Image (cartoon, rainbow, N blue to C red):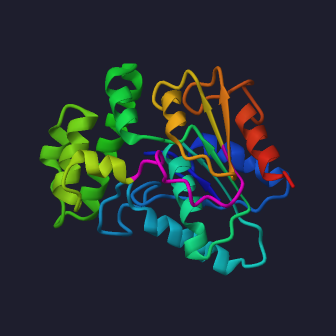
Amino acid sequence: MLLHGWEGSSDSLYLLSVAQALHERGFTVVRLNLRDHGGSHALNPELFHSCRIAEVVGAVARLQTLYPAASLSLAGFSLGGNFCLRVGARAPAAGIRIARIVAVCPVLDPATTLAALERGPAIYRHYFLIKWRRSLRAKQAAWPGQYDFGELLAEPSLTAMTERMVLKYTDFPDLATYLQGYAVTGDALNGLVAPTRVITSQDDPMILAQDLERLAQPPALRLTVTSHGGHCGYMDALSGPSWIDRAIVAELLRD
């Protein structure tokens, strides 16, 4: 199962690329859309937020129920990598058997990532502002009697938008509590049993490598930190599978 990043989708090019590489090696591939991603805004009235882990755990459990004899592995990018790690930590309690997990540049501490987006290269900040506002407009169009995002859309920054979303549309008391709710730092990954590899880079402008020191270190977890790669970059050719595609395939083929 492959999981995209925030405001990506099952049709994001990086997900299609690794899906093709896996398919060519004989894997059956499922590409999961998070709520309100990939044109799914009309399927559920509640708004997406990153602490909605239970429904992703449920989707993985359902997939295993449908194909009980299959070996199930997870791979995700950015926020999708964060979700994969949290699913992995919850898998034993949920009765899910996971063979392997690969998380590429996963969000580690959302507070750190949000701060880095605000002060980092403007291209990333503008990209997410445009994509998130477009998604909110689609959600409002799908549920016009339930949502009016006028004030939310008018906020000038990702931090201000997130805080307004949290206070108005979630049960979290404040922004800090919400951000901590989907962090994988501290003891959040102590429950990992499946062999898990995190791949990230020293020059990622959004996921700061310094946060790796704050991860739990269960025996199942293995870290790969490259010097270069940016955020989910790892391109070494203009065509064909990228380095990260080959790395994911190799990891999921390990005995």
Q: Residue furthest left?
A: 151
Q: Is residue 137 magenta?
A: no
Q: Could you tell me if residue 79 is visible in this image?
A: yes
Q: Decide which of 125, 142 is in the foreground and name it.
A: 125
Q: Could you tell me if residue 242 is visible in this image?
A: no
**Horizontal placement of 24 versus 42: left or right?**
right
Q: Is residue 178 above or below residue 157?
A: below
Q: Examine the residues drawn in magenta and state their main secondary structure.
A: loop
How many marks are shown on the rendered structure?
0
Q: Is residue 77 above or below residue 69?
A: above
Q: Residue at x 87, y 55 (%)?
A: 255
**Horizontal placement of 48 versus 164: left or right?**
right
Q: Is residue 185 magenta?
A: yes
**Horizontal placement of 147 versus 119: left or right?**
left
Q: Decide which of 43, 245 is in the foreground and name it.
A: 245
Q: Residue at x 35, y 34 (%)?
A: 114
**Residue 116 percent coordinates (x, y):** 38, 27
**Residue 186 percent coordinates (x, y):** 46, 47
Q: Which residues are magenta?
A: 182-197
**Residue 225 percent coordinates (x, y):** 65, 30
**Horizontal placement of 20 versus 171: left or right?**
right
On the rendered image, what quadrant is the N terminus found in?
Answer: bottom right
Q: Residue at x 41, y 52 (%)?
A: 182
**Residue 242 percent coordinates (x, y):** 73, 33
Q: Decide which of 127, 81 is in the foreground and name it.
A: 81
Q: Is residue 52 above or below residue 10?
A: below
Q: Residue at x 53, y 29 (%)?
A: 209
Q: Decide which of 191, 133 is in the foreground and name it.
A: 191
